[in-house]
Amino acid sequence: MRDMIKMLLVLTILATLSGWVLAAIRDNTKDRIENQVLEFVKGPAIRSILEEATNDPIIDRFQLKDGDMERTFFVGVMDGAPRAVTFETSGKGYGGDVGLMVGIDVTDNQIMGVGVTTHGETPGMGAKAKTDPSFVAQFRELPLKGPVKVTGDGGSINAISGATITSRAVCSATNDALQIYEKLKPQLTEKLKEFNK
Amino acid sequence: MARSIVQEFTKGLWDEVPPFRLVLGLCPVLAVTKSVENGIGMGVATTFVLVCSNVLVSMLRKVIPAKVRIACFIIIIATFVTVVELVMQAFAYPLFLKLGIFIPLIVVNCIVLGRSEAFASKNGMFRSLLDGLGIGIGFTLSLSALAAVRELLGTGDLTIWEKPIQVFGPSYQPFSFMVEAPGAFVALGLMLCLMNLVGKK
């Protein structure tokens, strides 16, 4: 009986202590980890879109409610004024969702650029959407009216050869982004005023 | 056979070096040794877990009841592995992306549990610390050596701190079989053979 109680006691104390230590460490590293994830997963795409930004878009981010969803927006300040917002949407690709960062130029009302963040596309084929800059370059300076389509569907985007599904996914993610922007425009404009210097 | 304190440390470097002599913990050995950088990262993470769990297990060895000792060891090991995982995510995210699932899998690495069970639960704290350190450093060195062989033959480069160094020059045709999974078995087999040849008395 004594053994039994001792076993219970030791295991309980150990597990409790372990939980306590881990919770403390998690609390202390949470913000850093969030920043690191943004920096290394979404960062490259954001920075390639907002190349000329004078601020750090990852630090200057805010969240807005879109229905039940929280969306994170990254602001690009150029020449002292907020010039662009980027945010992430996704489209159905060949190997799951293709995450796409879309940058919208709020001054000139056009697409500033797009960049693929996460994907499960075939290396050498669909994965080119991320690795080959000439594909996403086609989205630059497109008007916000949309919809963006590949040439096969009557649009202006040349699909990656052998990866039409991926190219369509990028287009549909862009179109989603345009709709979200239209919908949230009033709130966004309000928020962006805070970044005026 | 009683060992001197120095021997507790040095045995992990040659006599009982985990992947080659004990042939334990082969899963990460085969999987992450695609580049020297990954090898070192994995080795350091495992060393940290080994040292910390060895010390703690040895401190608590008189308190832990024999019947639930494995459960207690696993709690201790899992705690330190999670610490490593969180810290690595916070401070070395690119490395974490490359090592991925193999960091949480340190929990079930038989080297770690093996040292707790076979050594730390029977020896004092200082000896357990040296034992963990020795085995850990031996493990790191083995991973780095295996990774160096594979990366050198497979790509012609050596990657340390994200900077690939071209060793064989640009004209080298990579033997990419070596960085694929089967190449890991071949490289490990050859190194085991070499170790046995050198160590033969």
Image: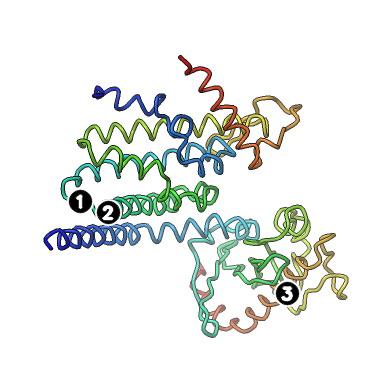
Instruction: Give the quarter of the figure containing the N terminus of chain A.
Output: bottom left
- Coordinates of residue A163 in the picture (x, y in percent): 80, 62
Q: Position of residue B113 (x, y in %)?
A: 35, 45
In this rendering, is residue A98 above or below B143? below
> Badge 1 is on which residue?
B64
Q: Quadrant of residue A45?
A: bottom right
Question: Disc 3 marks which residue?
Answer: A172
Percent position (x, y) of residue B131?
31, 32
Which amino acid is tagged 1? Ile
Looking at the rendered structure, the secondary structure element under dot 2 is helix
Q: Position of residue A56 (x, y in %)?
A: 52, 58
Three-letter code, disc 3: Ser
Please, what is the three-letter code of the amino acid marked with disc 2? Answer: Cys
Q: Is residue B17 left or right of residue B196?
A: left
Q: Residue at x 78, y 68 (%)?
A: A165
Q: Earlier in the sequence, mark 2 or mark 1?
A: 1
Looking at the image, residue B85 sits to the left or right of residue A140; the answer is left
